[in-house]
Image (tube, helix red, strand yellow):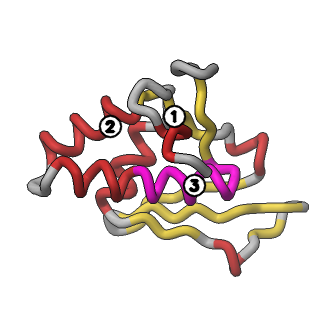
Amino acid sequence: MSSESFATDRRVVRQPSTDHGFVTRSIAGETIIVPVSSRVGDLDAIYTLNDVGSRIWALVESPTSVEEIVAILCDEYEAPRDQIASDLVELLRELEANGLIELVGGSDA
């Protein structure tokens, strides 16, 4: 996947859980995402998001640009902007590859 997939004007949004079959739960400050098929959880594919990942997951509940997410995280966490952006793109790529989010709009949409 090219870096253009996450151009700053692209918007990221969660896939509806009914479309791809997953459930999410927040437990002790972490978000747990469990893919479900045929009403059975795939325990080998559970995703656990720490507090920053959980914040990102909350931000993509509605379409939000990559740049907006970076700006929010920079305001909320003490880390260099380039590190936040790099870590964000890495997480978004993983979530997209597993069908949990999708890219909408942007310059090439």
Q: What percent of the width, then of the height, locates residue 44? A: 70, 80
Q: Earlier in the sequence, mark 1 or mark 3?
A: 1
Query: Which quarter of the rendering shows the C terminus?
Result: top right
Residue 103 relative to residue 59: left or right: right
Q: Are marks 1 and 2 in contact (CB under 8 Å)?
A: yes
Q: Which residues are magenta?
A: 89-100
Residue 95, numbered circle? 3
Q: What percent of the width, then of the height, locates residue 65? A: 41, 28
Q: Are marks 2 and 3 in contact (CB under 8 Å)?
A: no
**SS label for mark 2:** helix
Q: Are marks 1 and 3 in contact (CB under 8 Å)?
A: no
Q: Give the amino acid type for the residue marked by disc 2 in the picture.
A: Ile
Question: Label 2, on which residue?
Answer: 69
Out of 7 and 62, give the one closest to the viewer: 7
Measured Cα–Cα span from mark 2 to mark 3 = 15 Å
Instruction: Give the quarter of the image for residue 93.
Output: bottom right
Is 32 above or below relative to 8? below
Q: What percent of the width, then of the height, locates residue 30? A: 38, 65
Out of 3 and 44, give the one closest to the viewer: 3
Question: Label 1, on which residue?
Answer: 12
**SS label for mark 1:** strand
Q: Give the amino acid type for the residue marked by disc 3 in the picture.
A: Leu
Measured Cα–Cα span from mark 1 to mark 2 = 9 Å
